[in-house]
Image (cartoon, rainbow, N blue to C red):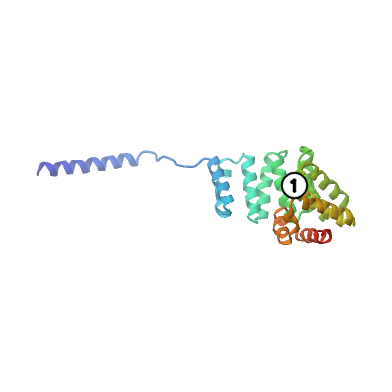
Amino acid sequence: MSLSSTIRRLTCQHLSLLVLAVSWLPLPVWAASAGEYRQQGLAYRQQERFPEAIAALQKAVELEPQNVSGRVLLGWTLHLAGQETEAANALVMAFYLNPQDVPTLNALGIVYLVGGDLTAAAITHAWAAALQPDNEIAYYNLSLTYQRMQQHDWAIATATRAAELEPSNPHPLVALAIAHWSKGEQPEAKQTYQQVLGLDGRFGDCPFLDLDLKRAAFSPEQIQLAKQVLSESE
């Protein structure tokens, strides 16, 4: 046997032994952290790639099941994807972990509101407002909730408070306008809607209202009512 053949044979034997040895070693784990999955999920959500976003955020929850904010991110993303039942389940789990977490309550209350569970929405947002008295989200959504429950005075009071807390946001003023209108206070409703138009002229465009107010948790009936107030205010 030639020297070169011997070297090749020995090299192959050494490689075989090396492969066998390595096969007994534990393989490295290249798993992303929960935080990395959350960042990935948020990136997908911004692109409106909801299945991928939900999968990443679910993995983050699996890795850190006690992380309340991670469950809120998952719940809110499920809500944006139109999966209201799953969103409520995720947010209820976050609530069990910390019943005094205001972001959890804000998100859960909106999910209840959009899903039509008005009693649960009112209770959840009222608790959020009690925990954080300057929580404009809670007051705003309470107004939408009370208007649908035909509790007009409460709807007006909570919308007024939300507008005081966030004066540059037109949505509380739209909620206030429809609350006045529902109570039969048409002059106050039209005057309030003029304030809305002063903040953002786009609220004078009905197609804009259809898209924007839906995203802002207005019901279809409330959107039509806002468009009625607009037509009477022009």
Which image quarter is the N terminus in?
A: top left
Left or right, 231 with reference to 49: right
Q: Could you classify mark 1 by the number of other residues whose Cα lies within 10 Å: few (under 14), some (14-19), or many (20 or more)? A: some
Residue beneath the point at 45% across and 42% down: 30
Outermost residue, left side = 1
Looking at the figure, which quarter contains the C terminus?
bottom right
- Indicate the position of residue 135 as horizontal and vertical percent values: 76, 41
**Residue 139 percent across, percent down from the top left:** 79, 45
When the figure is inspected, residue 65 is found, relative to residue 78, above or below; the finding is above
SS at mark 1 in the image: loop
Image location (x, y in percent) of residue 130: 79, 39
Give the total of numbered labels: 1
| Foreground residue among 81 and 65 | 81
Picture residue at 31% right of the left edge, 39% below the top:
21
- In the picture of the structure, the residue carrying the numbered disc 1 is 169
Residue under the point 72% across and 44% down? 105
Quadrant position of residue 138: top right
